[in-house]
Amino acid sequence: MANKHSYESGAGSDNSGRSVQEIIDNNSLTENEIQFLMIVTVMLMEYIGVETFSDCELKSVAAVMDIEIGSAKGILGSLAKKGILWTDRTSVDGPQYISFVDQDTMKEFF
């Protein structure tokens, strides 16, 4: 079954060779977007710079932030439009997994 991308990343996005800190420093982000990115970073730490695999679910990020899933979707949508994150599902009702754009070629956090 083909993956369904729920949010497309922004055109011309490129996180390749950049660290999460550089992504934060070089984008105009809200406090909620930064918090969202930090949570995703912790959840994906072992995969950054290695592979695009993700076991980071949107519902888990929402739970850690203590916000409604709809609010988390809004933050994720904004970060996807900025070309920082992307998400996919293996089915319509399946979990929504989050990855960094170019996650496999990114540098570690700092």
Image (spheres, grey):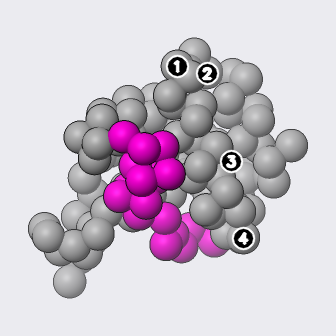
Q: Label 3: which residue?
A: 16
The numbered disc on residue 46 is 4
**Residue 53 x %, y %:** 54, 73
* Nearer-the-camera pick, 42 or 102: 42
The local secondary structure at tag 2 comes to loop
Say which label, 4 or 1, has the lower sequence index: 1
The image quadrant where one finds the N terminus is: bottom left
For this orientation, the residue located farthest to the top is 28
Compute the Cα span from label 3 to label 2: 15 Å
For this orientation, the residue located farthest to the bottom is 1
Q: Is residue 33 above or below residue 48?
A: above
Is 60 left, or right, of 6 in this rendering? right
Residue type for callout 1: Thr
Residue type for callout 3: Ser
Say which label, 3 or 1, has the lower sequence index: 3
* Nearer-the-camera pick, 27 or 63: 63
